[in-house]
Image: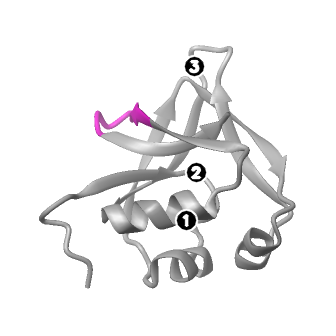
Amino acid sequence: MTDFTATPVLLFSYGTLQDKAVQLSNFGRELAGSADRMLGYAQSWVEITDPQVLATSGKTHHPIVRPGSNPEDSVSGMVFQISTEELAAADAYEVSDYKRVLVRLASGLDAWVYVSV
């Protein structure tokens, strides 16, 4: 079991990091989370060519988010509490189309999320 008492980290996922197979491959466990939304962002798709990520997710296209042009834009997803080691594993999983940023979610929580570079 992961110990979150020392350094809990919040990670917001709107895509493949919500998939059980991806979680087991990257974190060695299935994550429990709660629904939340990212405000001011819009979702589109990016083609994945990295063989390891393709094998893990089983998908050729993954969702990706960018700041939206409409103030009403939002992206639904899940917020997970993970360890700093698991955050590093998530960094390694994400391809170069993504960068990790800290955002305030609709719930008021601040969480890391991967957005378009």
- For residue 22, what is the image quadrant? bottom right
What separation in Å lies between label 2 and label 3 (alpha carbons)? 17 Å
Label whose residue precedes the other's in the sequence (3 or 1)? 1
- Which numbered marker is on residue 18? 1
Nearer the N terminus, badge 2 or badge 3?
A: 2
* Mark identifier at residue 14: 2
Disc 1 residue type (three-letter): Gln
Q: Are marks 2 and 1 in contact (CB under 8 Å)?
A: yes
Of 18 and 114, nearer the camera is 114
Q: Position of residue 20 (x, y in %)?
A: 56, 78
Name the amino acid type tagged 2: Tyr
Q: Is residue 50 magenta?
A: no
Instruction: Point out which mark residue 72 bears.
Output: 3
Residue 101, relative to residue 4: is it above or below? above
Secondary structure at badge 3 equals: loop
Q: Amino acid at mark 3?
A: Glu
Dot 1 lies on which element? helix
Q: Is residue 42 left or right of residue 6?
A: right
